[in-house]
Image (cartoon, grey):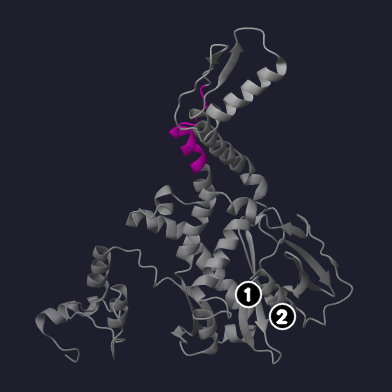
Amino acid sequence: MQLGFNRIFKNIFGRFKQIPQSLQSAFLLNGVPYYTSNISSVYDIALARACIHAIAINCAKLQPKHMLNGDFQKDSDLQYLLGTRPNPYMSSFEFIYKTASMLWSSNNVFVYCHHNEAGKLCAFYPIPYKSFELLEAGGYFYARFRCNNMTFVVPYEELIHLRRHFNEDDFTGSQQAHVLEPTLKLNDSVVESIVNGVRNSNKLQGLLKASSLVQEDELKKKKDEFVSNYLDISNTGGIGVIDNKFEFQQIKLEPVVIDDKQMQAVSNDLFRYYNVSENIVQSKYTEAEFNAFWNNVIEPFSIQFSLELTSKILTEKEIKSGQSIIMSAERMGFASMDTRTKAISTLMPLGVLSINESRKLMELPEIENGDRHLISLNFVDLKKANKYQVGESENE
């Protein structure tokens, strides 16, 4: 698959014949114009991957929508591209999942907006880069990416660039390797301690003492035989046999085992870094816990992605005319049935929700003429309340 994607990217980026030859590293006031992803060092840790997955899979529930003056353009080509098939190899769900996963794995994710030879936008590709370098020439920025076995340069204006921890560097989110390194090393030590504890608990350890003078080569032979027969991990009997020429003196080594409190401290470091709770990662959250997760993690991503999609896909004229790309949360469904019922009971009589909007909350299909807004006759204009009570008409 990697070879296939290399060929795809070569075909796509091979068209950039107009890339200037005078490219040089961009000058930044803060930071350096070079960034390495270090995705594998983080993503290979089971708990870190679980945190990233919990975030990415909920981000992937967001629905991209092409809007025009508040109206959903469900039949537009752009809507099909974003909402159904961003590229030939990913569904919209997979595209958003991968984008979010790469962002939380490396603090920077780049998505290439691919236009065909006629200039029409036809695909979006998250770039699986190993390193990124910001270049400039003629007042324009360019990005040089290095992947497994290829290098290519892309105009920066054709990239969707999402960043986390955007602080100390002018252009990229902060490197997270040095921040997570102590926690990741501690996590490795915890896992190694547990593995070693399990291994050593099943082994005999001690000294094999000869009761009389024995030649060195015979002593070594007896030791090797004893180790092979009784100290190998495959020996499950737990009993060793030796003749009276030797005496085995067992040495009891108590392995250092990490207790639950220490293990939880390591886990909490990762939970805090990714701003998720243990219940979110284990999918046993309450409605209140998910609301907090939504407000602090998913919604900021939704806003960031919406703004970047809008500014990189649409022209300034199109944006000023009312077009935008939003990431709708209507598929999230994190509210309980009781909460949804109360919301409909409260908001529908006020005319806030249409019939179909109420049905969506209950995960029901839309109906014909369901975009109408109904209102209760129990409500009246405050200025006309007295006249309404005594039955006066407005003309009286």
Confirm or deny contact between disc 2 and disc 1 (CB under 8 A).
yes
User: Label 2, label 1: how many angstroms apart (C-alpha)?
Assistant: 10 Å
Q: Is residue 302 left or right of residue 392?
A: right
Nearest the camera: 210 or 87?
A: 210
Residue 367, located in which quarter of the rendered image? bottom left
Q: Nearer the viewer, residue 396 or 2?
A: 2
User: Callout 1: few (<14), some (14-19), or many (20+) C-alpha neighbours within 10 Å?
Assistant: many
Question: Which residue position is annotated with label 2?
Answer: 12
Q: Residue at x 67, y 85 (%)?
A: 115
Residue 224 image-quadrant placement: top right
Q: Residue at x 46, y 31 (%)?
A: 259
Mark found first going from the N terminus, 2 or 1: 2
Q: Find the residue positioned furthest to the left.
A: 390
The image shows residue 32 at horizontal and vertical percentages of 78, 56
Secondary structure that dominates the magenta span: helix
Q: Amino acid at mark 2?
A: Ile
Please identify the quadrant where the N terminus is shown.
bottom right
Boundaries of the magenta span? 254-268
Q: Which secondary structure, mark 1?
A: strand
- Magenta stretch contains residue 19: no
Looking at the image, residue 15 sits to the left or right of residue 345; the answer is right
Question: How far from the left and from the top, in percent, is residue 111?
Answer: 64, 72
